[in-house]
Structure formats: structure tokens, C-alpha cells
Image (cartoon, rainbow, N blue to C red):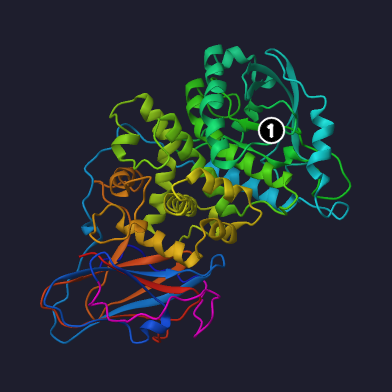
């Protein structure tokens, strides 16, 4: 047996014959000997009271068993033991995780950035404040009908498009504090570039814009927003709001964001690239707590890292590093802006989107903008050589680092420990692995449950009015346990060439066998690139593999049976040695060969 982690006991969630509110599949035989190659079976606890059976076989067999937790409740954690018994004297094959399919020999070109943990912490601060302190409805306006339309009429009526050189009076929320509405920095910003969709401004506290950027660089930023980011995110997530009536988004570069990264941070430890704050949609004054925000600029605005050639705000930041480091940030935060704005505007919606799904869609926005930038189609199956075709610094490498690498790196973290993290977990505000899994689940569903139209699929998710698991399942038009089942199996089976495997167990947008090994080599510091999904081998009859997983995820086991072997039986037990029956328990078996 290969075991790369020590099982962690979290919350015991073993319920004897408990109901989880999920309609179980029809009873199926626990004898898997009749399964065809590529077939997948799903078992509920009642199906396998005596374990999963495999009678004596004359031919070699190869199975993957996934113990899934499909409880619709967040962070329900199950502890259990997987035991494989064998008939006396029977041979038992052991397979290691490195046996997983054909491994890529591609190498990563150049130094890759580490996952930006400080940016995640900042996102957590902002999104948590929004959900806890800003409300869409009030006692004086229970239907929420006027919350947007009346406010917009008073602000937008006097709106005009500023010209280059104009000064804007702005309030920057202080994300280093606990109240972004009452704690802010009042400043002025100089307008430095204006396009049809963007107003680029530079904080006057940072100095004249032309000392930080060339005019060509500033115009390239607004041009990329006009031609790539705005139309892509709008097509995937819906038309952005326009609370100030100027049809543009303010892109503010300010040293106040630089201060959010600890000074003298070592290279590679990450940085805060910027953020959007939903408080800017709310009126600055009011009587009901949560329905107004004194900081509000009453405008669509991003707050971004500024060039700082002398390190005046804590760390030296070159113009080129800021330009490159904020491209993905804008694509990501623009989804948050569209999502929050349209929910706030819609009287039928009463709350912000759940953290896990909001972050998954924002990470989806990075991927979507990257695809547009590189002229990939929505469902083009990307190889690693597509997203990083060069081995030396090049424009494609900049696109790879800005839009693709981070999602794949976060997914690597989940694949390395799928038992500890879940795509639907409330840990999405603190866990990179959770975010990677959440992006992967939404990306997979857009591939397979969108009727080949991922843009309509994601627009429906943003529109609501539901949130979280309910929203996701309703838009996908499939039960959550079905979506989790197929996604979990796809994470193993994608592009392995398993004959007879249903197409819905494959990704359409990526070839995971190609893109994941070289990314994993960098993230996990591997000597050679290998597929990072952690799969434990089921060994001899004396092996009892202790395991745990969260709702929405699962653990993977490989059962490799040589020819002319004796009978096998695989059991999932609770920690007392009885048959496990936890809320949402599903056991999936895929015959690989």
C-alpha cells in the first residue's frame, strides 16, 4: 500500500442508516465481475452491506474505486476505513499512483510564479465583509424594488466621461481593517487613459502617471480591457452594471494596494494584485445598517497595485511586473463586479452568491479571458503545448502565467489531497485547493452540462436568484450527487483512452493528462512530471486504510487484479468496524481494464 498522508480526524459524521435527502440510484449488484471496460457503477450503503465482490477471475482486471461524499451540506466530514479481503492463497496485485496512465514528458518553460496566497487572503477579507455587512433588502424597502433604480437615477443623471488630465475624487476602502465601509483613504486620481469601456486613473499620491507608465502602456491596458476582458467576461457572466452612467469601469492604480503586501516580501511569496468592492454599488448614506456604505464611490471601480520603482510603499514594483501581475486580477475581479452588481440590481435576489461558486466563476473568468487572448475556442481541448508553447520567455508565457497557471496550480493542490478539500466547501475563502477544485467542478460542468454553450451556462449561474449548490444543480439540470460522481470519476479518467467510457466522464476544455503533470512538477517540486491525483492502492487483506473526506469530494483507490486470482471483497467501514453509512455516501467503481 502507498499512503502519502496521515489521515486527519475532523468531524465524525457516521450516521447509521441515516437519510441525506438525496435520491439514491436504483439498487445495483455488488458483484463487479460483469462490468465492462469503461463502465461506471454507483453504490449506496444498502448495495454493499457485504462489501464490493469480485469472484475468482481468469483474466486480469483493473478498477478504480472512489468513496464519495455527496451530502449537499457544506463541510460534512466522514471518517471511515477501506478494507480489501482476499481468498486464502490468492495473489493480489498492487498498483502505485505512478501507474496512472501515460505520463507527459513535457517540461515547464522558465520560472513559474507561486500561487498568490496574499491575494487570496485579501479576497477573503473583502468578500467576507460584503456577505456579513452589506444587505440587499431593508425593512423600509422589503421588496428591494427601488434599491438600485432610484440611486442610479440620482448619480447617473449628472455623470459624464472624464478626459485625460482630469482629477477624480475617490475613496479607497482600507482592506487592512475590519470595516471597509467606514475605514477608507480619501484621495485624488489623475485620469491617464480613456477608452470606450475603461477609465485608467493613477493615484496622485503615487506621483504623475507618466513617471510610472508610458502612455503606450496605459493605453494598452485600457485597450486590452476593451477588446478582450470586457467582452469576454460580459459574454460569460452578463452585462455589467453602470451605476454612474458613463458605460465605463474605473481602473485605479494606487500605492494603497501595495501596502497590503508585507514589506520586504521575498520574491515568489506572492503579492496583492488588487480587488473590487461591492460597497461601491451602495449609497454612501442611509438609515438602515447594511444598506449604505460611507466609502462608496457609486461607480464600477477596480483598485490595483501600482508601480513603485523605489519601494516607497513597501516593495519595489516595476511597471512591467505590475502590468503582467494585474492582468489576471482584472479578469477575476470583473466577474465579482458583474456578479455582485447584477444580484444587487435584481429585486428577486436577496443575497450575494455563495463563496465557493463566486470564486469558481471568478477563476473561470481568468480561463475564459486567457482563451480569448490566445484565440482558443470555448470548448477547445487544450494541451500543455497549447497554453505554453515556448520554452523561453515569450508573449505566450505571459498569457500562461496571467490566465492559466494559477487555476491549474490550485487544482494540483486539490488533486494531491482530494480527501481534505472539496469544491463546495466554505473553506473557499481560505483554501487554494478548495478554489482549484471549485473551478474544476464548474469548468467540468460547463463542458458537459451546458448543451455545448458554456457562456449561457455561466450567465445563468450569475443571474441566480438561487445561490451555491442549489443554483449550480438547477442550472446544470442535474442532481448534485450526479455532478459530483461524474466530476470525481473524470478527474481520474480524463483522456486516459479507456474504451467504452461515457463521454460525460471526459473534459472537453482540457486534456488533463497533458496539462497537469508539468504544472504539478512545479507546484509539488517533483523531479519528473507525474499526474498529481492521489490514488491509494488496495493491498493485502491485512490492510485497513483509514480515510476521511468532505462533502462534495472523495478518495481514490486502485484495485489491480492479476489473471487467475482468487475472490476479492472491498468494504467501507466506520471506525467501529461496522458497515459505513454516512450522509451522502456513494461508492463509484470504474473498470479501467
Asked which quadrant contains residue 497, the reply is bottom left
Above or below residue 282? Residue 69 is below
Residue at left offset 57%, top offset 17%: 212
Residue at left offset 40%, top offset 45%: 409
496 with respect to 194 (left or right): left
Asked which quadrant contains residue 257, the reply is top right
Q: Is residue 579 magenta?
A: no
Q: Provide residue 173's location: percent of width, then percent of height.
A: 71, 37
**544 or 477: nearer the viewer:** 477
Above or below residue 487? Residue 580 is below
Residue at left offset 45%, top offset 32%: 372
Residues in magenta, as a range: 11-35
Tell me the chief SS of the magenta region: loop
Q: Is residue 25 magenta?
A: yes
Q: Secondary structure at mark 1?
A: loop
Whether residue 575 can be seen here: no
Question: What residue sits right under mark 1 in the picture?
Answer: 300
Quadrant of the frame with the N terminus? bottom left
Mark 1: give few (<14), some (14-19) or many (20+) Cα within 10 Å: many
Q: Provide residue 51's location: percent of width, then percent of height.
A: 32, 83
**401 or 245: nearer the viewer:** 245
Residue at left offset 83%, top offset 45%: 146
Whether residue 421 can be seen here: yes
234 with respect to 397 (left or right): right
Asked which quadrant contains residue 199, the reply is top right
Amino acid at each position: 500500500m502507498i499512503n502519502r498522508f496521515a489521515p486527519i480526524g475532523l468531524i465524525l459524521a457516521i450516521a447509521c442508516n441515516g437519510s441525506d435527502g438525496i435520491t439514491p440510484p436504483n439498487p445495483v449488484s455488488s458483484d463487479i465481475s460483469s462490468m465492462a471496460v469503461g463502465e461506471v457503477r454507483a453504490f449506496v450503503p444498502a448495495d454493499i452491506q457485504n462489501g464490493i465482490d469480485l469472484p475468482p477471475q481468469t483474466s486480469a482486471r483493473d478498477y478504480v474505486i472512489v468513496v464519495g461524499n455527496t451530502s449537499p451540506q457544506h463541510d460534512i466530514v466522514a471518517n471511515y476505513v477501506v478494507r480489501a479481503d482476499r481468498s486464502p492463497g490468492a495473489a493480489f496485485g498492487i498498483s502505485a499512483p505512478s501507474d496512472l496512465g501515460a505520463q507527459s514528458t513535457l517540461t515547464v518553460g522558465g520560472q513559474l510564479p507561486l500561487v498568490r496566497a496574499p491575494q487570496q487572503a485579501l479576497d477573503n477579507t473583502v468578500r467576507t465583509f460584503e456577505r456579513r455587512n452589506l444587505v440587499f433588502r431593508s425593512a423600509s424597502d422589503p421588496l428591494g424594488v427601488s434599491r438600485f433604480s432610484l440611486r442610479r437615477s440620482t448619480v447617473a443623471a449628472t455623470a459624464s466621461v472624464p478626459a485625460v488630465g482630469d482629477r477624480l475624487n475617490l475613496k479607497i476602502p482600507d482592506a487592512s481593517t475590519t470595516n471597509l465601509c467606514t475605514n477608507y483613504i480619501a484621495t485624488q486620481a489623475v485620469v491617464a487613459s480613456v477608452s470606450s469601456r475603461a477609465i485608467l486613473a493613477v493615484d496622485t499620491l503615487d506621483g504623475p502617471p507618466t513617471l510610472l507608465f508610458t502612455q503606450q502602456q496605459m493605453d494598452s491596458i485600457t485597450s486590452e480591457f476593451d477588446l478582450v476582458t470586457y467582452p469576454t467576461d460580459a459574454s460569460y457572466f452578463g452585462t455589467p452594471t453602470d451605476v454612474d452612467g458613463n458605460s465605463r469601469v474605473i481602473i485605479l492604480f494606487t500605492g494603497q494596494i501595495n501596502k497590503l503586501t508585507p514589506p520586504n516580501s521575498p520574491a515568489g511569496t506572492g503579492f496583492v494584485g488588487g480587488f473590487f468592492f461591492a460597497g461601491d454599488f451602495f449609497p454612501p448614506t442611509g438609515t438602515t445598517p447594511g444598506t449604505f456604505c460611507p466609502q462608496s464611490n457609486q461607480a464600477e471601480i477596480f483598485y490595483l497595485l501600482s508601480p513603485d520603482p523605489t519601494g516607497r510603499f513597501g516593495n519595489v514594483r516595476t511597471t512591467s511586473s505590475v502590468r503582467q501581475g494585474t492582468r489576471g486580477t482584472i479578469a477575476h475581479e470583473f466577474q465579482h463586479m458583474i456578479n455582485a452588481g447584477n444580484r444587487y440590481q435584481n429585486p428577486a435576489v436577496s443575497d450575494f452568491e455563495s463563496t465557493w461558486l463566486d470564486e469558481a466563476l471568478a477563476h473561470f473568468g481568468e480561463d475564459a479571458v486567457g482563451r480569448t487572448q490566445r484565440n482558443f475556442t470555448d470548448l477547445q481541448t487544450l494541451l500543455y503545448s497549447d497554453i505554453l508553447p515556448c520554452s523561453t520567455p515569450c508573449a505566450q508565457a505571459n498569457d500562461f502565467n496571467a490566465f492559466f497557471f494559477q487555476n491549474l496550480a490550485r487544482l494540483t493542490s486539490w488533486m494531491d489531497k482530494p480527501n481534505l478539500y472539496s469544491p463546495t466547501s466554505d473553506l473557499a475563502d481560505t483554501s487554494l485547493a478548495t478554489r482549484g477544485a471549485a473551478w474544476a467542478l464548474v469548468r467540468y460542468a460547463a463542458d458537459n452540462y451546458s448543451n455545448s454553450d458554456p457562456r449561457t451556462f455561466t450567465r445563468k449561474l450569475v443571474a441566480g436568484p438561487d445561490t451555491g449548490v442549489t443554483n449550480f444543480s438547477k442550472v446544470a439540470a442535474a442532481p448534485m450527487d450526479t455532478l459530483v460522481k461524474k466530476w470525481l470519476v473524470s478527474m481520474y479518467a480524463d483522456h486516459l483512452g479507456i474504451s467504452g467510457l461515457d463521454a460525460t466522464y471526459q473534459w472537453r476544455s482540457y486534456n488533463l493528462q497533458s496539462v497537469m503533470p508539468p504544472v504539478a512538477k512545479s507546484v509539488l517540486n517533483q523531479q519528473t512530471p507525474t499526474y498529481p491525483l492521489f490514488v491509494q492502492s488496495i493491498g493485502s487483506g491485512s490492510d485497513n486504510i483509514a480515510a476521511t473526506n468532505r462533502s462534495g469530494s472523495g478518495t481514490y483507490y486502485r484495485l489491480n487484479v492479476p489473471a487467475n486470482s482468487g475472490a476479492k471483497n472491498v468494504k467501507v467501514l466506520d471506525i467501529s468496524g461496522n458497515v459505513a453509512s454516512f450522509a451522502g455516501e456513494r461508492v463509484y467503481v470504474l473498470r479501467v481494464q
